[in-house]
Image: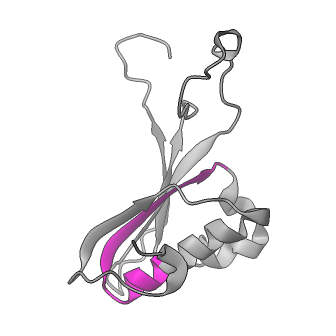
Amino acid sequence: MLDFLSGRTPDLPRCDGTITNPPFGPKGKTAEAFIARGLQLLGDGFTNFVALLLPHDFDSAKTRAHLFGDCPYFTGKITLRRRVKWFEHPDPARRKRNPKENTDWYLFERRLHNDRRPPFILYAPNNHNGGRHG
């Protein structure tokens, strides 16, 4: 087992990507540390991309501009149109309750130095579901 925030790199030549739902922590600082570590792994060439599942407005804090708008590795985000429900509540009376948190996948990738595409925003699932609502 390897603590992602330890600064140590797994004994692998490299990996294609790093995908995680990081712990948020007080004021989001643990999630910020996960992003910083992912950026370090991108910069070192250990991984090609990093995807983190975070609250929808995580990128809106001005103290996080260096992780998003000002970050050359920030590629974009996928806004989830359905809230993540991790498990059914064991109490049948509470099973109909729905999650209240909106989440996005925040994406970072290694790019060529001259690749200056702006970050994108996608939505999933899309509305092309054969007329069904959901």
Which span is picked out in magenta? 38-56
Residue in the image at 64% along x and 79% along y? 66
User: Of 80 and 16, which appears nearest the observer?
Assistant: 16
30 is higher (above) or lower (below) than 72: above
Q: Report the number of discs.
A: 0
**Res 29 → quadrant:** bottom right
The one of 38 and 81 positioned closer to us in this rendering: 38
Residue positioned 24% across, 80% down in the render: 14
In the rendering, at what x and y percent does residue 85 appear?
Answer: 55, 31
User: Residue, x 67% and y 59% (percent of image)?
Assistant: 24
Q: Relative to 126, say whether 49 is above or below.
A: below
Tell me where residue 65 appears, x and y as whole percent: 68, 74
Q: Which of 83 and 3 is in front in this view?
A: 3
Residue 122 visible at all:
yes
Quarter the N terminus occupies: bottom left
Question: Is residue 72 shown to the viewer in this render?
Answer: no
Say whether residue 116 is left or right of residue 121: left
Determine if the magenta segment contains residue 44: yes
Residue plotted at (71% across, 32% down): 100
Q: Which colour scheme is used?
A: one colour
Residue 61 x %, y %: 76, 65
Picture coordinates of residue 57 (x, y %)?
69, 52
